[in-house]
Amino acid sequence: SRAPYRSVMRSMTTANSDTGRCTGTLVGPDLVLTAQHCILRAFDLVSERITGRIVAEAMARGVFYAGSLNVVQVVARGAWTAEARPSSGDWVVLRVASTRFARYGVLEVRDEILDDHDLLSADLQVPGFGASSLLEERILSVGEPGSARRVFASGSFHHDCDTTRGSSGAPVLRCAADGLCRIVGISVGGFRHGSDTSLVVLAG
């Protein structure tokens, strides 16, 4: 229930009895930021219409639901498609049916990085909801702080923060000494290759 974690929520899609679970973040009174591939089952990339049910769920006090809201609109999205998948375009902003979640606080998206060194030296966190079991998927997990390992010209970077299946769309947070946290990326997938490195995409 503490900031900034109370602004992180689950996002779920249901279409043709197929359900997917990811993580999203409140970035406006009724706006949720997540990864675009998370809504693929319920969103038509060609017509840009929501074809299934997309839901955002805020959580509080462990496994207790704070509420669930339907997604009513795709406000903005990156240049990601199911065929051509530039990771730097795998983001989407969704509008939910109410501003009721705004009481949990809104996180700011930092749309610029000072330079690669600034990002590489930062302590980053990736809070996310798991998807491997009923219990895990309802509890927000935050591992030890990590850092960026490699920054690419495309606007994506590798990091070594702890993540779990279901944390796609989770915010990559950089928190200042005063406790103010900003989103500097979105977790979009993991590339282990014998290590603990995962791929993250910048949200700006």
Image (spheres, rainbow, N blue to C red):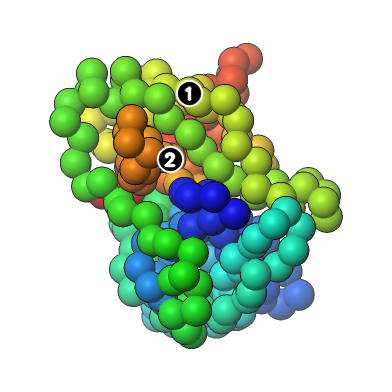
Q: Is residue 103 left or right of residue 180?
A: right
The residue identified by callout 2 is 172
- Crowding around mark 1 (Cα neighbors within 10 Å: few <14, some 14 to 19, many 20+) is some
Tell me, yes or no, whether the two marked residues, 2 and 1, touch with CB atoms within 8 Å: no
Q: Amino acid at mark 1?
A: Gly
Name the image quarter holding residue 28.
Answer: bottom left
The answer to whether residue 40 shows anywhere in this view is no
In the displayed structure, 184 sits above or below 129; it is above
Residue 106 or residue 165, whichever sits in front: 106
Q: Residue furthest front?
A: 178
> How far apart are the two marked residues, 2 and 1, measured between alpha carbons?
10 Å
Q: Residue furthest top?
A: 194
Name the image quarter holding residue 17.
Answer: bottom right
Q: Is residue 198 left or right of residue 80?
A: right
The residue identified by callout 1 is 146
Helix, strand or loop for disc 1: loop
Residue positioned 56% across, 81% down in the render: 70
Tell me residue 108's x, y (percent).
31, 53
